Image (cartoon, grey):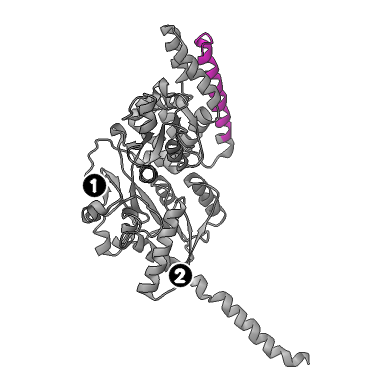
Amino acid sequence: MQKRHIPLLIIVIGITLLGVNFSPAQNNKLILVSPHQEGIRTEFEDAFVEWCQRELNQQVELEWLDVGGGTSTIRRRIQSDFQRSPEGINIDLLFGGGTEIFLSFADKGLLHPHKLPDEQLAKIPAELLGNRLYDSEYRWYGTAISGFGIIYNEALRKRLKLPKVQNWIDLVNPKLINRVGAADPRESGSAHMMYELILQGYGWEEGFRTLFEIAGNVKTFPAASSQIPQDVATGRMIYGFAIDFYAYQQIAAVGSDKLGYVLPADTAVFTPDSIAILKGAPNLELAKKFVEFVLSEEGQKIWMLKRGEPDGPKKFNLNRASVLPKLHEKLGERSSVSVNPFTFKSDFKYDFQKGSDRWVIVNDLIGTLIIDPHKQLVRAWKAINACQNSQDKEAALKEFSKMPLSEPEALELARGKWNTDAVLRNQKKVEWSNFAREKYRRAKELTKGQE
């Protein structure tokens, strides 16, 4: 009896193994990691699935991995996974997260190059205002263009007779105490970009001084940068750091008579929000098709058109600028984006390489000097602004603005062992934390205890 079942058992095992090794579902599945919000993921997934069915006669599936955080968390996770598995981490694509993360991964050899078809590539400028829109070795491409600025509740600003803001420096006004919002750059890539813009635009010492003083007015530092425009819209705060498309979403929902948005002219820059195929991508050919689709005119319209428009998004307004200059002209009033980055004038030059090199150490400095000791910082800031003695106030401000290291020293650490030597990094973070609490205590003391 047992012998009669052996051939059948072999057949069953063989069929099972064939199913495991050659499953069409595996061949047609893309695995992505992305800091993008649900609306972007949904619109591009639905559109790509439809495109594959129409153009390739192929059914595909997209899986979005949740790593429990934004760009900074994704960066840590991907680097950690590649340390354990250098040839691949079973993820096809990184979609979104700005530019610095892609520069870093390209330098580390973690991206798989893919040159777009010549006709498609010719439609994308290599640069915008001196900044690359795609990698010269085709390891990453900008898929949308982002601006960074200040969203404000115009209705409440007028009612409370608060000042208008045009530049970051306007946010240091002590009348704005507890009325400013900014996200934690350790969790949000777009938040990080705004801190870095201030540091590059104003210089290291003056930039950090500006950040310390703005932080004195900040009500809260949430992990998600998308929270800030929502809080401004509800009146929890009046002003907030915001990437352009989050601001535009709230303005569209609430009304331009109630909310406003400004791109600070002194640090105006447009940066690509990018995409890349990761080294060892399990479904390389389909990953290439996804990149090509996102950068096609059909894919780019999803960013710019209003929900419900022909060829536009079906469920969500994405409010993002395309990397195709001619599409801005073609869509005109149909576009949900009010600023054309290709006609915008700015003299500010952003250094992407510097920003990428010092990404982690800048986050650590902002965390240890500003966010973690925020209560002590605010107490010192209030005491400084209540101080009536000009000499005491000047001395307190000088103490309040102190930095534990210079820009060259920070870059030397960042380009050295900062990202690999956990002992060194933790030791310095403890030093900076103690430095921050002591300087805020001392600054408050120099005001003779006034609050």
Measured from the top left, where is residue 150 in percent x and y? 36, 35
Dividing the image into 4 quarters, which one contains the N terminus?
A: bottom right
> Disc 1 on helix, strand or loop?
loop
* Relative to 37, residue 403 above or below: above
Q: In screen coordinates, is 264 left or right of 215?
A: left
* Residue 398, above or below 258: above
Residue 400 can be seen, yes or no = yes
Across and down, in percent, residue 203 comes to: 35, 28
* Distance (Cα) linking label 2 and label 1: 35 Å
Say which residue label 2 marks: 60
For the point 27% across and 35% down, the residue is 348
Residue drawn at x 47%, y 63% as measured from the top left? 281
Vertical placement of residue 73 versus 398, above or below: below
> Percent position (x, y) of residue 65?
52, 57
Of the numbered discs 2 and 1, the one sitting upstream in the chain is 2
Would you say the magenta stretch is mainly helix, strand or loop? helix
Question: Is residue 313 left or right of 126 when viewed as pictured?
Answer: right
The image quadrant of residue 346 is top left
Question: Is 274 colored magenta in this rendering?
Answer: no
Disc 2 to disc 1: CB gap under 8 Å: no
Residue drawn 47% across the image and 61% down it: 92
Q: Which residues are magenta?
A: 426-451
Crowd tier of the residue under label 2, counting other residues whose Cα lies within 10 Å: few below 14, some 14–19, many 20 or above: many
Classify residue 109 by image quadrant: bottom left
> What is the three-letter code of the residue carrying label 2?
Val
Q: Which mark is residue 313?
A: none
Amino acid type at image mark 1: Phe
Count of numbered tags: 2
Residue 314, position in %: x, y? Answer: 38, 60
Report the residue marked by disc 1. 342
Residue 116 or 393: which is nearer the viewer? Answer: 393
